[in-house]
Amino acid sequence: MRLPHSLHWRISLAYTVLIIVTMGAVSFYLVDFVRDAFLMDLRGRLQREASLVAESASGIVGTAPDGRRLQLMADDLADIIDARVTIVGIDGAVLADSSEQSGRSQNLRRREEIRQALAVGVGGALRRDQTSGEEIIYSAVAIRRGGEIVAVARVGVSTADLQSNVNRLVTTISISALLVTALSVGLGYVLFRRTSRSVQLVAEGARRLAAGDLEFRVHASSSDETRDLADAFNSMANTIRSVVGDLSSERNKLTAVLDTMADGVVVLEADGKVSLMNRAAELLLDVGASETVGNRLVEVVRDYEIQQTVQKSIETGRIWQVEVELLPSRTFLSAIATPLGAVDGTTEASGVLLTLHDLTRMMQVETTRKEFVSNVSHELRNPLASIKAMVDTLEDGAIEERSVAVDFLRRISGDVDRMNGIVNDLLELSHLEGGFAPLHLSPVDLRHLVEEVLEKFRNSSGAEGLEFLADLPDTLSTVTGESGKLRQVLVNLVENAIRHTAEGKITISILDEGRFQKVRVADTGTGIPREHLPHVFERFYKVDRSRSDGGTGLGLAIVKHIVQAHGGEVGVESEEGVGSTFEFTIPRS
């Protein structure tokens, strides 16, 4: 049978066993003590009675040879003292005996009490009677006459009454012991239950505290030490709640800082497992939250250089840095691995803080700057070289030939105009990008602008073989913008379409789309290869750099910035050999 495991049950059982053992031992001791006391008292009484019998028989023994008188005395005294009275001669012969069952022929000289009485004057014994089978206690006193022992007076009584009294006493003691035991066990159980309840409340409080219930408090029902335990627990709970609150506040601050950082932060354990990664790092590494924490870095980041940098930092306890390019996203990162919990160069780190700084924008700016310088140099080099050559020719004597000189001067003027156009476009683009060219917004009728631009190109030279069409709705609301800037957008888009369309048609259409009007400029020219579409609005970008079409490479970039300044967007669709469609949106009035 399994015993209960609760504290109050174990204490109650131990307490019960202790009480039962103690009461049992006390009961056995009391029974033996009382029995011995009764026996001692009975022996003393019997000795006194035996002395009385001896005194009464001292004047009779030896005066009546037939013993009739002695027997009557023994019977009378036996009735008075309610005991067996026996007169025994010095030779052991029974002279008189109040017990009818006793035979006169017995010789009692060898009986212990008789021997003691004959020897010292007084004797006693306790034995079971062979005739009746009862336990008898005897007391014997020597009968003297003239200082000599002439006989022995013996008094005997059964211990049955004594045992009955002892049994009653044992019963009383047993009942008392059981009552005391029951009361003690009950009282102990109540006390232990009460104390155990307080301990259980503290244990329950500890479990709920561990489960995150920081508001739970223990209310002690007693005023003993368990109240001190409950008060100590509540004080601890208050402290833990305060500490957890502070930690939670700090964690929230740290989380807010990490989540709003532009730099990626990754915390790694010594075995390479990711224990923390902020949102910026997830975006830079193009991974999801479920793929990071708990996984190894080699499973999250496939870049070998970053892995090696982290490993070196762990092994050497030093800061390592590397710049890498992640493919296929072509993201440029500066990765700095800082050891955690290590003295520089003396021990292996317990972890690594990996900081990721996005260099993509900086690299793009640097690439754009280089391309800009290269493109400007390229665009200006050809007209400057042409001007230089023609000036040298004129200096060498060609100026004397009027027709040649006039032609060269015309060409020089054209190249200067071209360079001036590049410079003007660059200045305008710079003003647009820097926000130095504020717009003067007003309601604008795009239908009127489209018709005006198309009419201009229909009447211009260099547009032979092209058909200019307009697809305009019957009713069209106005837009909010600067008329001159929007006209420049349309002119740039049409000029771009003319440069790439030898023959065919160029169509301008307008669509109402919610809060915006969308303008589309479609041509049936050569089209743009798919790989060039993302770059057509970049400065100086030309799909076919071998073509000499007179463009500066800045027209579409200017279109993009003017449209964005109006709050719209630009886009392009094209199919090589079929044609291209450029479109932009402008907010409606």
Image (tube, grey):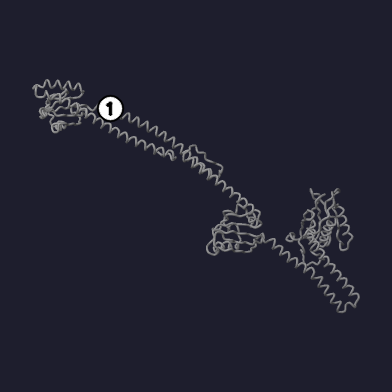
Q: Which quadrant: the N terminus?
A: top left
Residue at image location 41% in from the left, 37% down from the top: 12
Residue at image location 86% in from the left, 70% down from the top: 413
Q: Residue furthest bottom?
A: 396
Residue at image location 37% in from the left, 38% down from the top: 18
Q: Which quarter of the figure has residue 43? A: top left
The answer to whether 96 is drawn above or below residue 509 in the figure is above
Q: Which quarter of the figure has residue 455? A: bottom right
How many labels sit on residues? 1
Closest to the observer: 100 or 551?
Answer: 100
Question: For this view, does 349 lie left or right of residue 505?
Answer: left
Query: Can you give x and y, in whole percent of width and height, for residue 2 in the image?
Result: 41, 39
> Dot 1 corresponds to which residue?
165
Question: For this view, does 444 lie left or right of residue 276?
Answer: right
Identity of the amino acid at label 1?
Asn
Query: Can you give x and y, in whole percent of width and height, for residue 350 in the image?
Result: 54, 58
Asked which secondary structure carries label 1, the reply is helix
Residue at image location 42% in from the left, 34% down from the top: 187
